[in-house]
Image: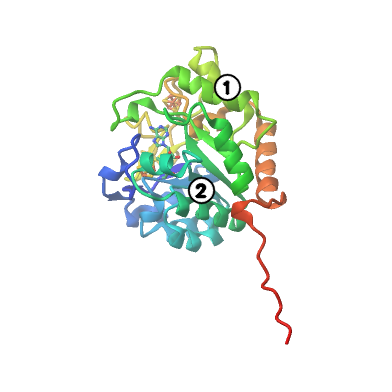
Amino acid sequence: MIWNIDYFCNLRCKSCNAWQGQIFFPEDQIDKHIDEMKKNGIKIVSVTGGEPTLNKSVESIIKKLKEKHFITHIASNGTNPFVLRKLYPYLDGATISLDSNIPEEHNEYRGLKIFDTVVKTIIESKKRLKIVTANALVTNFNYFKVKDMVEFANDELGVPLSMCFPDQGSYYFQDFQVTDDMIKQAFSYAYENYDKHVFGNTRSYYREAVDYVNRKTVSKCKAGQTVYYTDYKGKVHPCFTHIETVLNKKPVWDKFTEDCNDCFTQCFREPSMPTPFEDAKLVSKIWWFNHVKTRNTQYFKPVQTPPTVSS
Ligand SMILES: C[S@@+](CC[C@H](N)C(=O)[O-])C[C@H]1O[C@@H](n2cnc3c(N)ncnc32)[C@H](O)[C@@H]1O
Ligand code: SF4
Ligand code: SF4
């Protein structure tokens, strides 16, 4: 389940209008929705937004999810380490947004000087959680430098790089579109160089992202069948696009059975890939990379022990 708990944000990203809203998931529906998810067989809940750490109920939501034995994940912009620290005991994983290895580019795109905080959040969260990735939205200033971004994430921060397929319809605040060629270039690099770096999506996803742009046949999307979207008002939909379809009108949710191929959003595509072993392999690889591999870079300097003073 992708559970959107607020339409509210502290940043001003050029591809997203969450910062224009001020709506929070109704507190009195939290318990009911958690029960509903349990009864409908949901196993993994990814809490998102807007920026989920800005909802004052986020701690109680994640704690309750863990008490009910869900696998818990958060998607965050990484600017709120104080709240994230309260969540770590109840979280299994996180993706923290990082759209460039160049601080000025990330800050310019997100509308605030946040790069250093985000980098610290990524490093801290990976020590506290089972799996963490830095998550880049593929866009016009980074599509040609996936190599630089993944090297920065892997070598400097010690986390894999996952990538968002851009929803071009949501580019409200800039006067250009991310072109198919840009998207192809980014995902092709990840597909072709998958074994040279550590990425946070399956290789099949990257291959299919390129196929999708090339209008070739791809796996059937299972949005509304094995993965769902809850909006900040408590309605369950197949995905971000089909908000006209409400699946939780009855205690046993309806299924969305339409053949739809209108987008390639990873939240709904990854769980549809016909490669369950690849998913399991990816999760163990991320865990191994986060926790076992050691490194010594500017962000991982060994602690300097002061020289002993002899009298
Ligand atoms: C909507 S945000 C919510 C979580 C959090 N506020 C964040 O930015 O990470 C989830 C992810 O969607 C990405 N995103 C933003 N605009 C997008 C768009 N137009 N198409 C696809 N992904 C987008 C963000 O970069 C982020 O990685
Ligand atoms: S992408 Fe995330 S951080 Fe950026 S405006 Fe949207 S919700 Fe906020
Ligand atoms: S292809 Fe996209 S729009 Fe269509 S059901 Fe899947 S996630 Fe929704």
For marks 2 and 1, the one nearer the N-term is 2
x then y, percent, for residue 193: 65, 27
Give the label on residue 285, or none: none
Horizontally, residue 302 falls left or right of residue 63, namely: right
Q: Residue at x 51, y 26 (%)?
A: 144
The answer to whether residue 50 is left or right of residue 128 is left
**Residue picked out by circle 2:** 38
Residue 308 x, y percent position in the rendering = 71, 78
Q: How many other residues sit within 10 Å of disc 2, few (<14), some (14-19) or many (≥20)?
A: some
Q: Is residue 265 visible?
A: yes
Q: CA distance from mark 2 to mark 1?
A: 38 Å
Q: Quadrant of ligand 3?
A: top left
305 in relation to 21, above or below = below
The structure's colour scheme is rainbow
- The percent coordinates of residue 37 (x first, y second) are 47, 46
Q: Give residue 188's mark.
A: 1
Q: Residue at x 46, y 21 (%)?
A: 182
- Residue drawn at point x = 44 percent, y = 62 percent: 82
Q: Quick check: 167 above or below 61?
A: above
Which residue sits furthest front?
A: 311
**Along the horizontal axis of the image, is 242 left or right of 210?**
left
Q: How many marks?
A: 2
Quarter of the image that includes the C terminus: bottom right
- What is the three-letter code of the residue carrying label 1? Ser
Q: Which element is circle 2 on?
A: helix
Amino acid under disc 2 = Lys
The answer to whether 246 appears left or right of 197 in the picture is left
Nearest the viewer among 247 and 134 is 134
Q: Nearer the viewer, residue 45 or 279?
A: 279
